[in-house]
Image: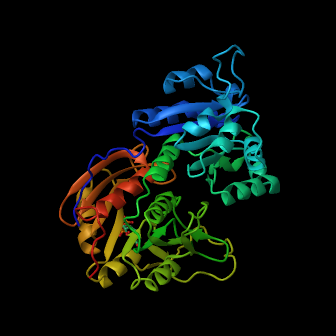
């Protein structure tokens, strides 16, 4: 394995992208998306709905895109020379159409083929082979309503990529699915649409993710704060590159990445058993789970009663899922682990790499801002078996997942031959 993180020409360079913005609060994030696209060399034009214009200013979008923002389908004047075919202009021009945020209303209009504004007209005048990426954002109840779900199904059947909204705090005060994906995430999806990476096609990847729960009695357990996001991002990233991916997950609140086989487990023993079953048919084993090192040695069956002023719970050592794979690893199989350490303790991570017979370890710390459990970002340093050390800086877990997979690429970029 060789570390190669080369600067690449962005797949969006020179591409013509129409960004459709409808009326959700997440619209305020769209100038950032335009900037990311422009910086990468894309041409961007914006189709803004009337409602979208109430959440983000036309002036901001025109400034960052360098183009007039289009809202209605009618030309400003009806004098000769006016743009009488404006309603079809963006649809004919675009290499890709991205709609973010897509409200319930806009999704309904698109699925029904209405065309009373620039955004909806662009949708039905787009060339059939052009990718359409839709990022819904709305209140959780609206998103789950049968009508919205039916419209999303219709759009998917037509070949549109409709992405699941993310979970989190919503403008309504609720918490749940409904948030628009972040601009960086949307930017990543646009890049993928232009340059699908299939470097892991034919590769079988197993990812462990999330915390484990170790039962004390029938109603209590020992666990940790792992959200599962890093492991889920890795599973999604590997799948995107064409791998067949099995995700063995402890209890988390995350949707299953598209096309990934998910096995839900609770305890370290269950995770170990699920992983062991797949050792032989695994090409790359990535352990992102925060497995509890110990479990209560004899969990009680019912609910333990309160009694003495003190109580002791005897703990037994759990199997190390990753080390188990490392031990049985055959030539050609790769093992990747994480090392959550106190800041600066790279040496401990390197020892883990040796001890568990890994090819790559991602050192991270819970002590720095923006890193560790329950946050969207991570600050990782990759350590390879060959001694390389690559600090990745602060980045989203999605980007970190991409970098980890990049680092597994053999020199030359093709898939490593299997032994
Ligand atoms: N790991 C595992 N099974 C365990 C413990 C850890 O598969 N029972 C994996 C984790 O998924 C991670 C790596 O081993 O990829 C390192 O985990 P970490 O908790 O940092 O290290 P430990 O080996 O548990 O050592 P320590 O807690 O003493 O630092």
- How many numbered callouts? 0
Q: Going by the image, does 227 lie left or right of 175?
A: left
Residue depicted at x 65% and y 38%: 122
Q: Nearer the viewer, residue 119 or 107?
A: 119
Looking at the picture, the colour scheme in use is: rainbow
Which image quarter holds the N terminus?
A: bottom left
Instruction: Provide residue 98's location: percent of width, then percent of height.
Output: 58, 43
In percent of width and height, residue 135 lies at: 62, 47
Q: Judge whether residue 397 can be spotted in this image.
A: no
Please tell me in which quadrant of the rendered image residue 182 appears: top right
Indicate whether 297 appears above or below 97: below
Q: Residue visible at 77% across and 42% down?
A: 114
Q: Please say whether residue 9 is visible from this viewpoint.
A: yes
Q: Quadrant of ligand 1?
A: bottom left
Q: Quadrant of the C terminus?
A: bottom left
| Whether residue 340 is situated above or below residue 175 in the rendered picture | below
322 relative to 112 in the view: left or right: left
**Could you tell me residue 34's position as x and y percent?**
51, 33
- Residue 312 is left or right of residue 357, and the answer is right
Q: Position of residue 90 (x, y in %)?
A: 60, 34
- Kindly identify the residue that appears in the image at 41 percent across and 77 percent down: 321
Is residue 106 left or right of 162 when viewed as pictured? right
Name the residue at the front extreme.
Answer: 80
Which residue occupies the extreme left position in the image? 387
């Amino acid at each position: 394995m060789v570390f190669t993180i080369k600067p690449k020409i962005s797949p969006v360079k020179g591409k013509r992208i129409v960004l459709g913005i409808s009326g959700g609060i997440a619209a305020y994030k769209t100038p950032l998306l335009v900037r990311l696209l422009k910086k990468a060399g894309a041409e961007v034009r914006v189709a803004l709905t009337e409602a979208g214009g109430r959440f983000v200013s036309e002036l901001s979008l025109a400034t960052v895109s360098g183009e007039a923002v289009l809202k209605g389908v009618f030309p400003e004047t009806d004098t000769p020379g006016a743009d009488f075919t404006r309603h079809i202009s963006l649809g004919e021009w675009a290499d890709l159409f991205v709609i973010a945020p897509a409200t319930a209303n806009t999704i309904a209009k698109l699925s029904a083929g209405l065309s009373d504004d620039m955004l909806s007209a662009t949708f039905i005048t787009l060339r059939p082979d052009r990718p359409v990426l839709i990022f819904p954002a709305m209140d959780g109840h609206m998103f789950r309503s049968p009508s919205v779900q039916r419209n999303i199904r219709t759009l998917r059947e037509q070949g549109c990529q409709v992405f699941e909204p993310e979970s989190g705090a919503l403008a309504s005060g609720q918490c749940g699915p409904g948030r628009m994906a972040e601009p960086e995430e949307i930017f990543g999806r646009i890049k993928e649409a232009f340059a699908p990476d299939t470097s892991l096609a034919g590769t079988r990847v197993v990812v462990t993710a999330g915390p484990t729960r170790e039962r004390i009695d029938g109603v209590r357990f020992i666990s940790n704060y792992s959200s599962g996001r890093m492991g889920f991002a890795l599973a999604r990233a590997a799948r995107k590159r064409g791998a067949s991916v099995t995700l063995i997950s402890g209890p988390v609140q995350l949707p299953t990445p598209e096309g990934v086989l998910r096995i839900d487990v609770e305890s370290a023993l269950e995770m170990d058993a699920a992983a062991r079953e797949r050792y032989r048919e695994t090409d790359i084993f990535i352990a992102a789970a925060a497995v509890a090192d110990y479990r209560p040695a004899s969990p009680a069956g019912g609910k333990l009663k309160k009694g003495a002023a003190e109580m002791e719970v005897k703990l037994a050592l759990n199997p190390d899922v990753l080390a188990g794979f490392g031990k049985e690893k055959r030539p050609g199989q790769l093992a990747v682990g994480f090392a959550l350490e106190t800041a600066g303790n790279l040496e401990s991570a390197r020892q883990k790499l040796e001890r568990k017979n890994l090819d790559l370890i991602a050192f991270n710390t819970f002590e720095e801002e923006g890193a560790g459990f329950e946050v969207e970002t991570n600050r990782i340093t990759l350590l390879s078996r060959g001694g390389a050390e690559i600090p990745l800086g602060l980045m989203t877990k999605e980007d970190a997942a991409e970098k980890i997979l990049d680092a597994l690429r053999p020199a030359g970029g093709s898939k490593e031959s299997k032994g």
